[in-house]
Image (spheres, helix red, strand yellow):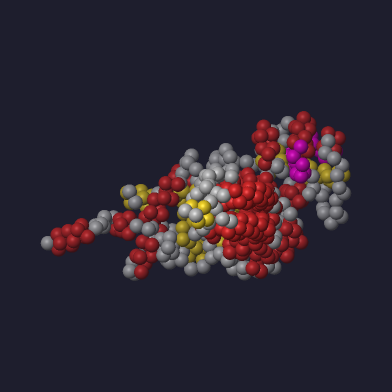
Amino acid sequence: MNTNNDLSRVSFIVMREMRVPLMALLLVYVVAVSVMVFIPGPEIDGKAQYLSIFHAFYFMTYTATTTGFGEIPFEFSDAQRLWVIICLYMSVVTWFYALGSIIRLFQNAFFIRAVAEWRFSRRVNRIIGPFYIICGFGDTGSVLVRGLNDAGLRSVVIDSSEERIQALSLRNYKMFVPGLCADASVPKHLLEAGLLSKHCKAVVSITRNEETNLKISAIARLLNPNIGIITMSKVNDYEETLATLGGEVHIVDPFKTFAKVLNACINNPAFYAMNNWLVGDKGATLESIVRPPVGRWIICGYGRMGMEANHVLTMNGVKTSVIDPHSRRKEEEIETYIVGRTNAKTLRLAGIDEAVGILAAADDDGQNLSVLLNARCLNKDLFTIVRQNSHQNELAFAKANVDMIMQPTLVTARKIMLLLIAPLLKHFFWYLLAKEPGRDKVLREIICQLRKKIGDKKPLLVTIDFTREKSSAVIACLDKGEDVFLGDIIADPRNRKHELALVPFVIRSEGENIPLPRMTHKVKEGDQLLFCGTEQARNLLKSAINSEYDLFYLRTGKHQAAGYFMQWYERRFSKT
């Protein structure tokens, strides 16, 4: 429907701009041909020859375009030649006018925009499988689209920057990603991006403007009440409004997410290492455990990140000193609060000599790096956490040898990607982080399994839906009243005595989330399984749950005859 509207808009602009030139051309041709057929030609056998309408039009066609095939079908009289001269100048001038109009049309900003929207809408309509609308293609959007593309999930992009959309078209994605340069908060553009399509699963609003994100989310909810909404917000007031939209709404706050990671790092260093390894953090391994020391910490910059970090550190019994150019609010309880810029003097006042860690949390990368260098000059043994605001400064931060780097765009992109790729992962993490006896031992056992089964290979988080479309062989067995156990499907179809290189994390069955499910769990239609494994294990498992022969072997240990002849042969000789 939107494609038709955009096509109508393109047609309207073309007709409006080209109406006069086309009418002028038509008038010139009509007059030229009409007069031409009435002008007498040379006499043959005493009879004057006249051009037919077809011959007159044919002659005018190549004359007006200055092709020049000569006088056809006979030599012209002087009167005809005089009229041809007039027609030639008249038509050439008219054609120049028409060509100028065409050039102006292709330079018309409204025409260019209308064509771009029509092409974008047409490409979106061609998407068959599920896809996501990404509003905003900055650092966060770029990382998110790359991650989704690598995971085999389609996305379409809307961004107000022409440069970013051009950059999108130059990326080497596995699957084509349509992009439109437009304001995503305009309802029309969300409709062009496929908001009402049955394949559209969610709208992700991650522009730099909090108000725009709120507007996009509200419009998306009004236009499609069933659509999922994921939005980035760092302002509490906006978060409260977003929470009232109803339906499936996920609000991603990078600073709160980082605070949770910092808390996990303090209390469960092994979990922090596993989390970084799962999200594919560069250089992360299951052994790369980071343990922030306990003692006095200095927080430089008391914005959103500083506040969230101070809350987590204080909650864990860590004393903090804050340096910030702005005065603090009265209700905040901080032991040492120094008003001013971070320099050697304020760092000494904050107790840099006795401090064990420093957090540079300003929204300026240059300032954070200078704070880091100043602090190290005064205390070389500091544990350092630095906020990286721009992805372009990655090389500088990599050289800084920092213990932890907090990049809000990266934190946001990874959080959203996990929500889309592995929605059950949060239930698994809640289970691991629950303060219950023996949970540390469970975490160590899981890490041991991951290390043993996956090792140095790239880990993949995979969600399997046991539905007729995605697990046909499993559902066929269930329809026959046969049981399919979890242990059956995670066995290796090449040798069922071995398990695939994967670790089941959680299974959702009949509305209940079951962390670390047993191998004796009976699979039911509609179940959803999340596991971490290798790419080969994922492919073998997906093949097994859709192949009746593989699944038969995994369940019984016997090979089912394939083909009519082999089935007849088996029936015939098994009876004898």
Left or right of 229, for residue 497: left
Q: Quadrant of the C terminus?
A: bottom left
User: Is residue 419 found inside the magenta-colored segment of the image?
Assistant: no
Residue 455 image offset from top left, x and y in percent = 47, 41
Left or right of 199, for residue 251: right
For residue 367, what is the image quadrant?
top right
Left or right of 483, for residue 346: right
For residue 292, what is the image quadrant?
top right
- Rendered residue at 65%/50% (across/down): 86
For residue 324, what is the image quadrant?
top right
Residue 93 or residue 353, whichever sits in front: 93
Q: How many marks?
A: 0
Q: Quadrant of the N terminus?
A: bottom right
- Rendered residue at 62%/54% (across/down): 116
Magenta range: 348-366
Residue 486 or residue 95, whichever sits in front: 95
